[in-house]
């Protein structure tokens, strides 16, 4: 309790505490410290060796279900017109591929159908001409008009019906380009629509993406192609398996997480967009990695240290370079420690305190051996006489070497 009280044999301090033996030269050994084994035991110091083992980690995160962006389709019309009839009238409706969505009346479409019929008759009239240019011109006119209707997405069946019956249809029917759910509907009966208008957005939910937010310190464990297990809180008896397909390149500055995309099969439509889910990514195992318990690591900010136990009560700090953290109490050591070396896992700070105490005692002892009954106060010795300095030559009372130009206070007897 009082490091300034020193005796040359066992006893008790004035405060009633048992004195701890300290031998000269044993306080600091190569940057370490030697502590009596009995004191080590009373401090509750625990030791574990650095070993090699397979290191793995399960990265757990919270995910959100989203659409597979490759399976989202937008429906546009390629002609100017007005909506005559809606077959799909609300968002959230399931549609099948090629299902009718709406009918559009377009004067331009009507006139083009008339031109096609005229081009057909002209082709038939010039087909037997003895002038090749005339017959070819009739064929070219017919094909150009036909091509215009095809580019407006008029189906082949409608064109064949028009050529067979000669009946001009007033409206054009738009069909669903894919199966899925209508996520956006921006058209109503009687509205005027054009090529720039997005009429429907249809998303196929048979396959979905899940976005998991992974903390940046766990990103070294995550790789594309790894397996991910998905659990839903409302469906505890069911798990879903997916594959990590992409790791986004930016980190959110607020949450310090990066998005990881997982592809999931959703043929039964149980996963719905914007659902939250628990994600467990099964990472690759790193075989034969040198590890120590995480409790042995001291992180000071500038350095990372462990306290090595060298035997016979000797302890020394080691600066180490760490690697991956398994998250279950083990951390990889890449340099600074060898396999089989013992490190302190509990009581490091008590050892540090004891080393500083012994260092302070040694500085106060100086080169002279202490005598029984002496009490060292600051940098002087009280022994029934005037205070005499005991600091080593060339050092002040704190053990700091004196340098030219330093200022110091000097007290002495005599006239002012």
Image (cartoon, helix red, strand yellow):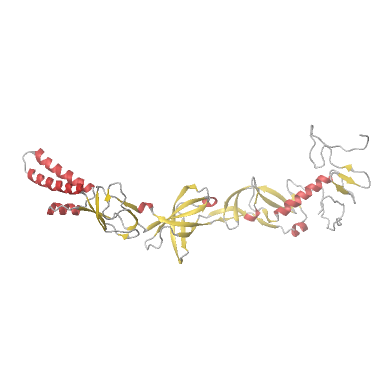
Q: Position of residue 397 (x, y in %)?
A: 82, 42
The image quadrant that residue 41 belongs to is bottom right
Quadrant assignment, res 96: bottom left
Give above or below for 396 relative to 39.
above
Of 227 and 373, nearer the camera is 373
Q: Is residue 293 visible?
A: no
Q: Is residue 295 left or right of residue 395?
A: left
User: Of 17 and 72, which appears nearest the observer?
Assistant: 72
For the view shown, which residue lies furthest in the front direction? 190
Residue 152: give x, y in percent of width and height: 23, 48
**What is the quadrant of the C terminus in the image?**
top right
Task: Tell me if I can see residue 258 in this picture.
Answer: yes
Please identify the quadrant where the N terminus is shown.
bottom right
Would residue 366 be found to the left or right of residue 33 on screen? right
Q: Is residue 79 left or right of residue 31?
A: left
| Residue found 69% across the figure and 48% down from its top | 317
Position of residue 297 measured from the top left corner of the image (x, y, whole percent): 64, 52
Q: Give the tally of numbered discs.
A: 0
Q: Residue at x 17, y 45 (%)?
A: 145
Q: Give the image location of residue 400, x and y in percent.
A: 78, 40
Considering every residue shown, the one lying at the far top of the view is: 405
């Amino acid at each position: 309790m009082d490091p300034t009280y020193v005796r040359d044999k066992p006893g008790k301090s004035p405060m009633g505490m048992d004195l701890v033996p300290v031998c000269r030269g044993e306080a600091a050994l190569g940057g370490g410290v030697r502590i009596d084994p009995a004191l080590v035991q009373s401090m509750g110091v625990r030791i574990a060796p650095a070993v090699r083992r397979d290191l793995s980690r399960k990265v757990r995160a919270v995910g959100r279900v989203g659409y597979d962006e490759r399976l989202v389709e937008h429906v546009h019309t390629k002609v100017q017109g007005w909506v005559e009839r809606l077959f799909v009238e609300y968002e959230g409706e399931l549609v099948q591929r090629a299902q009718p969505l709406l009918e559009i009346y377009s004067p331009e479409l009507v006139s083009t159908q008339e031109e096609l019929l005229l081009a057909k008759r002209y082709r038939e009239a010039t087909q037997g001409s003895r002038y090749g240019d005339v017959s070819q011109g009739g064929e070219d006119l017919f094909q150009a008009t036909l091509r215009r209707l095809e580019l407006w997405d008029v189906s082949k069946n409608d064109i064949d019906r028009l050529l067979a019956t000669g009946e001009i249809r007033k409206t054009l029917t738009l069909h669903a380009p894919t199966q899925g759910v209508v996520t956006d509907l921006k058209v109503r009966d009687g509205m005027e629509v054009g090529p720039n208008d997005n009429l429907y957005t249809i998303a196929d939910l048979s396959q979905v993406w899940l976005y998991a937010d992974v903390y940046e310190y766990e990103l070294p464990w995550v790789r594309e192609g790894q397996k991910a297990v998905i659990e839903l809180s409302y469906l505890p008896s069911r798990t879903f398996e997916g594959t990590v397909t992409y790791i986004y390149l930016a980190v959110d500055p607020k949450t310090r997480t990066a998005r990881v995309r997982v592809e999931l099969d959703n043929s039964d439509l149980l996963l719905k967009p914007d659902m939250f889910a628990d994600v467990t990514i099964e990472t690759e195992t790193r075989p034969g990695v040198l590890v120590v318990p995480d409790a042995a690591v001291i992180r000071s900010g500038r350095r990372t240290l462990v306290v090595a136990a060298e035997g016979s009560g000797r302890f020394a700090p080691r600066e180490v370079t760490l690697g991956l953290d398994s998250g279950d109490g083990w951390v990889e050591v890449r340099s600074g420690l060898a396999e089989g070396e013992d490190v302190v896992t509990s009581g490091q700070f008590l050892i540090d305190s004891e080393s500083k105490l012994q260092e302070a005692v040694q500085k106060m002892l100086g080169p002279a051996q202490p005598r029984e009954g002496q009490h060292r106060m600051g940098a002087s010795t009280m022994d029934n006489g005037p205070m005499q300095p005991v600091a080593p030559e060339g050092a002040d009372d704190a053990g700091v070497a004196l340098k030219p130009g330093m200022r110091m206070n000097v007290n002495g007897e005599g006239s002012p």
